Amino acid sequence: MDLLDTLTAKGLRGETPTREEALAVLATTDDELLDVVAAAGRVRRRWFGRRVKLNYLVNLKSGLCPEDCSYCSQRLGSKAEILKYTWLKPGQAAEAAKAGVSGGAKRVCLVASGRGPTDRDIDRVTDTVAAIKEADPAVEICACLGLLSDNQAERLKAAGVDAYNHNLNTSEGTYGDITTTHTYADRVDTVQKAHGAGLSACSGLIAGMGESDEDLVDVVFALRELGSDSVPVNFLIPFEGTPLAKEWNLSPQRCLRILAMVRFVNPDTEVRIAGGREVHLRSMQPLGLHLANSIFLGDYLTSEGQAGQADLDMIRDGGFEIEGMGEGTLPRHRADIAADAAAGAGGGGGPCGGGHGQAAGAEAGTAAAPEAAGCGTGGGCGPCGGHGHGHAAETEAGAEGTEGTDEARTDLVRVRRRGAGTELAPNA
């Protein structure tokens, strides 16, 4: 197929495709799907080899959010039966992070619900970061706290935070359809504040909210232009008690085409399969690893993920390798750009959230040599992946069927009842 030959050649050179080419990926048929995965897989291996980065979520503060994001179980007026609790103590958060790191995660994502942090909240996060890094200085820390005010990003950077997540979620043209309490421009401003302070920018999208192909392409190109080092791709789980409870629009095939499009547009950027992969990709999750180079291990914010050991087995059974704690995630040329940006903002050197830094001996323009090893709020809703999707296990089946499936698998969705903020051990 000429399209895939063109996209592969561009991706191997690190070039961005045209909008028309990106749209054409989403328009491919199921008969062409394996060809699309194979082509995007070549691009993924060019820049990231067969490494998979593991990330682990710690929900510092759950529920009770004043924002009205239609997709979020923590939103204002949500009737989803999720856990609600105020700030975890630093020791509790550090203990939860330890579980993820022991499972192979190299990045811990600290998430708190709400429009955005107060200065006191920044102090809380600072204490939590110190507790986590005291136990393991090498772990990457990504914060997701909502809309940032002036100087807050700088304070997080000084505290040892490596990256900041704030997802754009959807296109600018349709953003007002899913949220009214803040704007698309507010989100862009926070990503720019984080980047300007020397934090690695982690920003992604949610697919499956009724958007068009054009909307998906718009938001992915916007993320590329913003310079996001990490792009989490979330797949909406419509849970009871939110306005999008009936939006079952995704099939495994559709999810794979979306991931392939994101990879082609971001050939040398960390692409993460985030919230919803278990529900929508289902048995085709291993194919997603040929497109993305990063996943979450275990549970999300308010929904249970696949068992952590099952994730590790899936990675190894597919011939992939877990990215080591000391390895840089980004290819050298991207890592150098990110490091220069951090230095220009007054940041320090060394590996950080977006993989700033690289394994010794890697050649310019290539991925580091793999080393095997044992990473939703209102204003910021959706940690590097999560969005608090989930609803009760007893939800009845009967949602509208989607293309390529007989019916939506609502039985796979589980509200999170374990991990940080509970008395049950996290699923790492």
Image (tube, grey):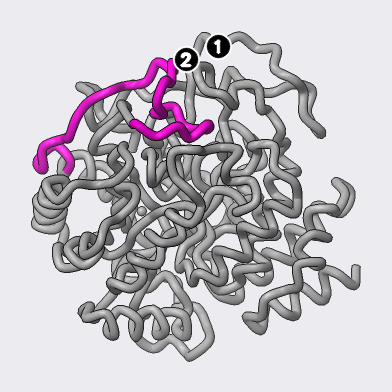
Cβ atoms at labels 2 and 1 below 8 Å apart:
yes
Q: Position of residue 77 (x, y in %)?
A: 42, 20
Residue 300 colored magenta? no
Question: Is 31 or 395 nearer to us in this picture?
Answer: 395
Q: Bin the neighbour count of mark 2 within 10 Å (Cα to Cα): few under 14, some 14-19, many 20 and up.
A: some
Quarter of the image containing the N terminus? Answer: bottom right
| Residue 265 against residue 411 in the figure, above or below | below
Type of residue at label 2?
Ala
**Badge 2 element:** loop
Horizontal side of residue 114 vs 363, given as left or right? left
Question: Is 247 or 321 nearer to us in this picture?
Answer: 247
Question: Is 180 or 29 nearer to us in this picture?
Answer: 180
| Residue 379 against residue 9 in the figure, above or below | above
Residues drawn in magenta: 66-93
Q: Bin the neighbour count of mark 1 within 10 Å (Cα to Cα): few under 14, some 14-19, many 20 and up.
A: some
Q: Position of residue 252 (x, y in %)?
A: 71, 39
Answer yes or no: is residue 277 visible.
Answer: yes
Residue 79 colored magenta? yes
Q: Residue 395: give its label.
A: 1
Q: Position of residue 382 (x, y in %)?
A: 43, 43
Q: Residue 392: give its label.
A: 2
Q: CA distance from mark 2 to mark 1?
A: 6 Å
Residue occupying image coordinates x 45% and y 68%: 229
